[in-house]
Every structure is written in structure tokens, then in C-alpha cells.
Image: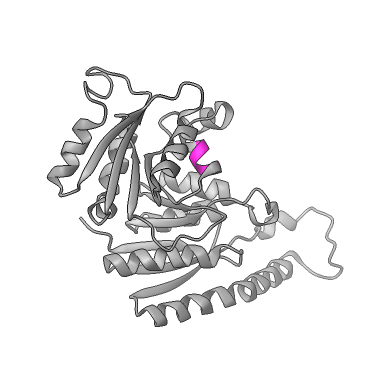
């Protein structure tokens, strides 16, 4: 198992270059093909029919065409920066510019990649967040592939050297561990942590995280099992705190063990990681 196809979503936002840096470093380390994806998300012509057109003498088709031209012009420097970086890195790569609904387009293209690199929405720059949360959640839930979320702040020159794996013995956690094997195999430190573990056959076993560590050892991954009890804070916050304590540069976790709607209303580990991440987070559902 290896990462051979990596997809990264790029736009004209301030963090696009950071995502490209993370994706390029992973592609270089794993000898993977890197695809840069730009998306032009335009309203349909039908949107303008029956509305009060502010453009005197301009039909809906002309309005959409003008918006398309403007969007292409905006993304042109992003494409140029991608090609320049790929030439400098000497990576096998391609650029795709696709028109369509952002969440649906990214999820579709993610199905043909081993890993998709996406950005976290920036709560301090709401103008840059249009469609971002929906894009990340939809890609996790519908692509059948893992997502690497990159925080909206900070730089990450090394991703996957010191990895924290969140383990709760669920299907989603097992899927995340399996999908992350190419990264775990090249890590210098892998810690598998169970937060508030349940003992017994229906939970984490008699020794929390020991069984999955043994499984990883058979794949050549040297991992250590750990557990923490933190009843006074949410599990997601406990994971982020533990990651900071061990200096992790990557968190691996299963995504949306509960329904996404429930997590949005009541909170959950996935929602906490997506909103509060301080290091890149690898998520699989």
C-alpha cells in the first residue's frame, strides 16, 4: 500500500500556498502524482430569470459568462503558482480547472485519489469560507477516500513524522488506521491513544489500544499504546491536548461515528477536530 495519487484543492485564499506545500511534501516523500484542483462555482443561468436584473440590457447568459471570465482570471495566478512549484520540485503533476458546485466537484475528484488535501475554514475570515465546511464534510462522507485537513493558521514543514492515532475501536477508526498506513509506515513516532476507554470485548479490549498496535506492528509500524481519562473535557479536546503534549504533527482519526447532523447539533470528536485543529488531521469515514 502506498500513496500514489494525491489531490489538493487550491483557490485564491491566503492558505492555498500552505496546502500546496503540505501536498507537495507528501507527494515528494511518497513518489506520488499530485493533482491541483481549482473549482469555479457559478450560479446557473436559471438563477437570474424572474429576478430583478441589476444589469440593464444584459441577459442572464451574458451575466454568467462575465462571472465565468472573472473567475478564470482570479484562479489564473493559482494555476501559475502550482506549475511553478511543480517544476521546482520535479514532481509528476497535473492541473484541473473544473466548473461546478464546490462540495460535489471536490468529492467526485477525490474518489480517484489516495488522499485529498483540503483547508480548514477560517473563522476570522468568513469571506473566504463560502462552501468550505460543506466541501470538507461532503468529501469525507461521500468520496470513500481519506481527507487531510490543514489548519487555517500555522506552517507545517513536516507532516507525519510524529503521529497521534485516535483509537476508539469503531469501524471509522479502523478505516482511518488502514487508510493512513502509508503515512504510519514512514513515521518516526506513532502513538495510539484511547480516550476514556471502555474495557472488555465490546470496547477496547483488556489493554486499551494494544490490539491495534499489535496489528500495526505486523505492518512494520512501531507504535506505542496509550490511554487517557479526561471526564472533565470533551474527547476531541482531550485528543488535541494529548497531541500537543507529545509534539504530534499529525492526528489520524475516524470521522463521523455519529451522524453529521448530530455532531453539528450536539458536538463530537470530528466536529471538534475540524473546528479546533492545530496540526493537520487525517480523517476517514
Magenta stretch: give its range. 271-275
Nearer-the-camera pick, 110 or 283: 283
- In the image, is 61 to the left or to the right of 244? right
Residue ID at (83%, 60%): 53
Position of residue 241 measured from the top left corner of the image (x, y, whole percent):
47, 38
Q: Is residue 34 above or below residue 119?
A: below
Residue ID at (65%, 48%): 123
Q: Quadrant of residue 169?
A: top left
Q: Is residue 155 above or below residue 126?
A: below
Task: Specify how the rendered protein is coloured.
Answer: one colour
Position of residue 212 measured from the top left corner of the image (x, y, whole percent):
22, 35
Q: Quadrant of residue 252?
A: top left
Q: Is residue 10 visible from the viewing direction of this image? A: no
Residue ID at (24%, 17%): 200
Position of residue 58 measured from the top left corner of the image (x, y, whole percent):
80, 70
Q: Please tell me how many numbered marks the rendered image carries.
A: 0
Position of residue 193 measured from the top left corner of the image (x, y, whole percent):
33, 34
Query: Which quarter of the figure is the N terminus placed in?
Result: bottom left
Furthest residue in direction front, as rendered: 245
Query: Which quarter of the figure is the C terminus placed in?
Result: top left
- In the image, is 109 to the left or to the right of 63? left
Q: Main secondary structure of the magenta part?
A: helix
Amino acid at each position: 500500500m502506498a500513496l500514489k495519487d494525491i489531490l489538493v484543492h487550491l483557490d485564491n485564499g491566503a492558505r492555498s500556498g500552505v496546502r500546496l506545500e503540505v501536498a507537495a511534501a507528501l507527494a515528494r516523500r511518497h513518489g506520488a502524482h499530485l493533482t491541483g484542483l481549482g473549482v469555479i462555482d457559478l450560479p446557473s443561468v436559471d438563477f437570474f430569470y424572474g429576478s430583478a436584473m441589476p444589469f440593464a440590457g444584459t441577459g442572464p447568459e451574458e451575466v454568467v459568462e462575465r462571472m465565468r471570465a472573472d473567475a478564470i482570471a482570479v484562479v489564473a495566478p493559482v494555476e501559475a503558482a502550482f506549475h511553478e512549484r511543480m517544476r521546482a520540485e520535479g514532481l509528476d503533476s497535473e492541473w484541473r480547472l473544473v466548473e461546478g458546485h464546490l462540495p460535489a466537484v471536490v468529492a467526485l475528484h477525490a474518489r480517484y485519489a489516495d488522499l485529498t488535501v483540503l483547508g480548514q475554514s477560517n473563522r476570522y475570515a468568513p469571506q473566504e469560507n463560502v462552501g468550505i465546511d460543506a466541501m470538507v464534510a461532503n468529501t469525507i462522507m461521500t468520496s470513500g477516500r481519506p481527507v487531510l485537513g490543514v489548519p487555517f493558521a500555522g506552517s507545517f514543514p513536516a507532516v507525519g513524522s510524529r503521529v497521534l492515532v485516535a483509537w476508539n475501536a469503531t469501524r471509522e477508526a479502523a478505516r482511518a488506521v488502514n487508510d493512513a498506513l502509508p503515512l504510519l509506515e514512514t513515521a518516526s513516532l506513532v502513538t495510539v491513544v484511547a480516550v476514556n476507554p471502555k474495557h472488555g470485548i465490546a470496547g477496547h479490549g483488556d489493554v486499551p489500544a494494544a490490539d491495534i498496535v499489535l496489528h500495526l506492528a505486523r505492518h512494520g509500524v512501531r507504535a506505542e499504546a496509550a490511554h487517557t481519562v479526561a471526564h472533565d473535557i470533551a474527547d476531541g479536546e482531550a485528543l488535541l491536548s494529548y497531541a500537543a503534549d507529545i509534539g504530534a504533527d499529525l492526528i489520524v482519526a475516524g470521522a463521523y461515528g455519529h451522524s453529521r447532523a448530530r455532531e453539528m447539533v450536539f458536538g463530537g470528536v470530528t466536529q471538534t477536530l475540524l473546528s479546533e485543529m492545530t496540526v493537520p488531521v487525517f480523517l476517514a469515514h
